[in-house]
Amino acid sequence: MRRRKRRGGGHEVEMDGVILDLDRRQAVVDGRAVVLGVRVFELFRLLLEQEGAVVSKDDLIAAAWGGLHVEENNLQVQIGALRRILGKHAIITVAGRGYQLTRGAARFVAGVGPPDLQWPSVAVLPFVADAAAEALVGPLAQQLVDALSQAAWTRVVSAMATAALGRPAMDDVPVIAKRLGVRYLLEGSIERAGPDASRISARLVAGESGVVLWTGRHTHPDAAPLDRLTANLATQVDSQIFAVEMDRCLTRGPATSAWEVVASANAAYRRANAEGTWEGVAQAERGLEQAPTSGPAHVTLGLALAIYQFYFAQGDSALMVSRARHHIDRALQLDPRNPFTMANAATGLCFAGEPDEGVYWAERVLALNTVMPPVQAFRAMGIGCALLDRHDASVAYADKAIAAAPEAHIVHSTLAWKANALIRARRWKDARQTLDQAIAVKPDFYWPSFAKALLRARDGDAAGAANHLARACEMAPELSPDDLAMQWARAFRGNTVAAEMISALADIRPNAADHAGDRLLD
């Protein structure tokens, strides 16, 4: 969708070939002007303002009828009229909740967005199918669009905009991507895999170059609901796009939009060390200079500050926690229904010492995004439940996050928090296995090695503990053993098993054990 000034003044929105004049309250479809009725216009404006979030029927009625009591069928009639202008797939009916403008209609696409955020965008092309699987092409494309419309990182154009496109040759990819205004294309194929199933291959393609960035293959039983498959595919696509965006921002030089700053900040503190996390803080601060009213920019800064004070600050930094909380609260005020904002706010609140509130926001974003729950929300639930000693729930949510996006950039830290919950529950064998998995995913992540040092110390293996401690300190040279013990204290505050493990450090570093142990049960 493109928002622009009309020649001679005024404002217009262009979407899938439909031009909507917000001042004259009219639409131009195929060169023909269509005047929008007052109620249709107000419905469209409210749906547009919510940018892809579900809007309740009560809120829509209040906006279009000014608080008058009207029957629900009146709303249905006006929504039908709006669909005839925008296209029947532009507005989704969410049973029992209300209506949702698809992100293809509601979000600004790459290069034409507002100055605050230019989100990465994708178009789902019709998959190529053999004759026996042809019936799946339409439903698969529409359900993928519906699922991606709830994505945390990515914006998707409507299925109607791509329905007439066939399978592009590689030379045609940049042309199609430019025509649709997207950075990425999702294409693929469907073929029968025996009498009772189909084999579906999906490929994520870079719009500028036609390079295949990711491929996913799934066997779909005919008896299984299609929405499970499309939700899984959409989650993987969203995660892959964000990973590519982070790498893209690192190689492009200085960020030129707040979205690039958000991606750059995430890429910086993905390094899981003090320098990278502080660079993430600095990147997010620059983002706010460009977009002071951007919810995602505020929440990115709040999360970066919360992570830094949790892992790297010397002592408890009340000022840093207060700053983190300020930006998280501001983000939720500005963007209360954006899944990116809500999920990252939930995580930030957990790190800022408010796990109860973090769990509340994570539960809320999961309730609002049932088609494609954000991986970050599962992770936030895992962290919050661990900090609240809800061990089994923490492990379950960590497993959901990893299963939904096994290649996501947050898998290593999700595994670390799963190990936290297992240690709290005294499930030592499972904790060791999980720590080994975290090390395998990110070998330079110091925290699992430090956790293994404490587990070795608990078992009385001083040599093994010293070896793992030395490895952790080598990977994070800016942190002393005392600093690592302080991190452990923050991560396990109030839990008795952690205090026992901290005391075992006396065999290796008596000062570290004493320093952290005093704080553990504050």
Image (cartoon, helix red, strand yellow):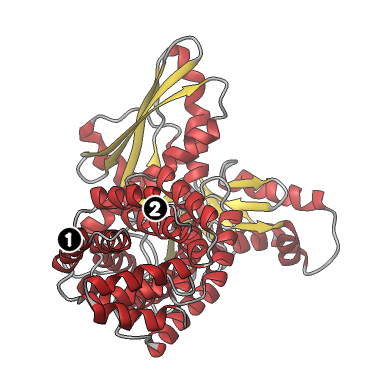
Residue type at numbered disc 1? Ala
Question: Which is more N-terminal, label 2 or label 1?
Answer: 2
Above or below, comparing residue 140 to residue 191 in the picture: below
Residue type at numbered disc 2? Trp
94 lies left or right of 378: right
Which x, y percent locates residue 177?
31, 44
Which x, y percent locates residue 331?
48, 74
On the question of residue 307 being in view, the answer is no
Please name the residue shown 55% across and 76% down the image: 333
Above or below, comparing residue 427 to residue 125 in the picture: below
- The tag on residue 428 is 2
Q: Residue furthest top?
A: 195
168 lies left or right of 84: left
- How far apart are the two marked residues, 1 and 2, measured between alpha carbons? 19 Å
- The tag on residue 463 is 1
116 lies left or right of 450: right
